[in-house]
């Protein structure tokens, strides 16, 4: 049986993965998902998030919809799914 040479180190948490790579000054992101599978977005109050220490930017769908330098859509075949929800939040079922 042929296995991975570092299998034991991986399952015991001793291997550093590239996703854990950090550089000085690096920012981290957090995504807030809707708790509802299908909901109309009435308003988003970002004031509490902006007041947290260390927060550099709070970004919503309304912030990116009219930007010429950013295409706010993605998709595996057609780029027709919004990166950030704007008017409606919908669960994609792919998470």
Image (tube, rainbow, N blue to C red):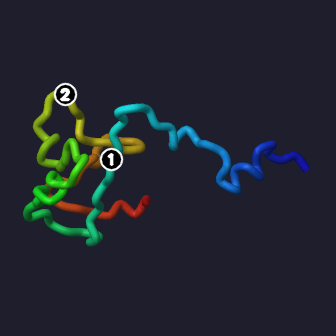
The percent coordinates of residue 9 (x first, y second) are 73, 49
User: Crowdedness of circle 2 by 10 Å Cα count: few (<14), some, many (20+)?
Assistant: few
Front residue of 35/13: it is: 13
Front residue of 11/92: it is: 11
Check disc 2 and report its element: helix, strand or loop: loop
**Residue found 10% across the figure and 56% down from its top:** 47
Residue 37 to residue 64: above or below = below
The quadrant holding residue 43 is: bottom left
The quadrant holding residue 69 is: top left
Question: Where residue 83 is drawn, which disc sits there?
Answer: none
Of pointers 2 and 1, the one earlier in the residue sequence: 1
**Residue found 10% across the figure and 37% down from its top:** 66
Residue 43 to residue 28: above or below = below
Mark 2 or 1: in front is: 1
**Residue found 28% across the figure and 59% down from its top:** 32
Q: Quadrant of the C terminus?
A: bottom left
Front residue of 89/49: it is: 49
The percent coordinates of residue 41 (x first, y second) are 13, 63
Question: Where residue 29 is drawn, which disc sits there?
Answer: 1
> On the picture, is 21 further left or further right than 46?
right
Q: How many marks?
A: 2
User: Crowdedness of circle 1 by 10 Å Cα count: few (<14), some, many (20+)?
Assistant: few
Question: Where residue 69 is drawn, which disc sits there?
Answer: 2
> On the picture, is 5 further left or further right than 20?
right
> On the picture, is 17 further left or further right than 61?
right
Q: Farthest top residue?
A: 69
């Amino acid at each position: 049986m042929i296995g991975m040479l570092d299998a034991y180190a991986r399952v015991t948490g001793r291997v550093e993965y590239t996703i854990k790579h950090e550089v000085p000054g690096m920012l981290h992101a957090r995504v807030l998902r809707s708790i509802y599978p299908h909901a109309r977005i009435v308003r988003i109050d970002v004031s509490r998030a902006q007041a947290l220490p260390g927060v550099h930017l709070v970004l919503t769908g309304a912030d990116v919809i009219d930007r010429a330098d950013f295409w706010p859509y993605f998709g595996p075949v057609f780029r027709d799914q919004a990166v950030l929800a704007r008017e409606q939040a919908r669960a994609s079922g792919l998470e």
